[in-house]
Amino acid sequence: MAILSNFTNFTINRIIIVSTVALALSVKNSLQIPLKDFLTLTFQQKESLEQFREEVKHKVPHDYMKKDSYLIYWLRDQLFNVSDAKELLTKNLAWREKNKMDTIMEEDWADFDYEYRVNIEGCDKEGKPVFSIPIGDWDIRRAVIAGKGDKLMRYFDKVFEEASTMIRLMQADGQNATQLIVIFDVSSFSLGQHSCPRCLSIYLYLMSTLQAHYPGYVHKLISVNLYP
């Protein structure tokens, strides 16, 4: 019976891991495009960009949001459909204002930075920043039980904002950075820490926020240590 119980726990644990990875892979990744090619458009795409810029330039609150390198993320995500890109960006601007995203990095995140760390590993050979997330070490369940689930979801918003800001600063410095590589390390993945229903809602929030508010910023999501 003990062997069967251990086998069952092992199987359930792996199912949860696979489900989490599948959820991650459901994010609509865009093809990695070097910066010089990212800004190189066809004649029709340039027309779409000019139209898009004219329609949103009075809506966006920051100068960096008026630049081609920012606007193209939204257009590429919507296959250069100006109407759809405008709708997505408008929703994002409302979300940013509601959630005070311009000042999110000024909040006190010391405890969360320690408990739910995200590592910056440098860049790959093509200049893409590489982030690693030891998700197996994250005690999501503890945060939920402690009533910090909402704070944890906001922490993810802060992480995404930091990553997008890093890319923007790298571009301003002339570096070839348009997208991230994100590595999920699922070693030490615990059934008790990660399998609660409310924990799953946090994972869903993580992925939906990335897609809705930072489209095209992730080139590839990689899972490592999936199996012992």
Image: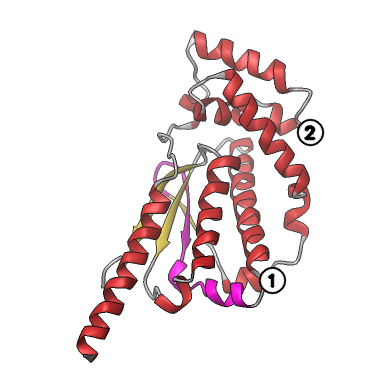
Residue 187 is left or right of residue 82, and the answer is left
Numbered label attached to residue 186: none
Q: Residue at x 54, y 38 (%)?
A: 215
Q: Nearer the viewer, residue 218 or 1?
A: 1
Numbered label attached to residue 61: 2
Instruction: Look at the numbered disc 1 and give the secondary structure of its residue.
Output: helix
How many tags in the picture? Answer: 2
Q: Quadrant of the C terminus?
A: bottom left
Residue beneath label 1, please?
110
Residue 10 placed where, x, y %? Answer: 28, 76
Q: Residue at x 41, y 41 (%)?
A: 126
Part of the protein shown in magenta: 124-145
Residue lying at the far bottom in this picture: please name it: 2
Residue 126 in the magenta stretch? The answer is yes
Instruction: Look at the numbered disc 2 and give the secondary structure of its residue.
Output: loop
Q: Residue at x 43, y 40 (%)?
A: 29
Q: At label 2, which amino acid type do we have? A: Pro
Crowdedness of circle 2 by 10 Å Cα count: few (<14), some, many (20+)? few
Give the answer, above or below, for where 224 lies relative to 127: below
Q: At label 1, which amino acid type do we have? A: Ala
Crowdedness of circle 1 by 10 Å Cα count: few (<14), some, many (20+)? few
Residue 64 in the magenta stretch? The answer is no
Residue 65 placed where, x, y %? Answer: 70, 31
Gap between marks 1 and 2, in whole Å?
29 Å
Give the answer, above or below, for where 7 lies relative to 140: below
Q: Quadrant of the N terminus?
A: bottom left
Q: Residue at x 40, y 46 (%)?
A: 26
Q: Nearer the viewer, residue 42 or 21?
A: 21
Of callouts 1 and 2, the N-terminal one: 2
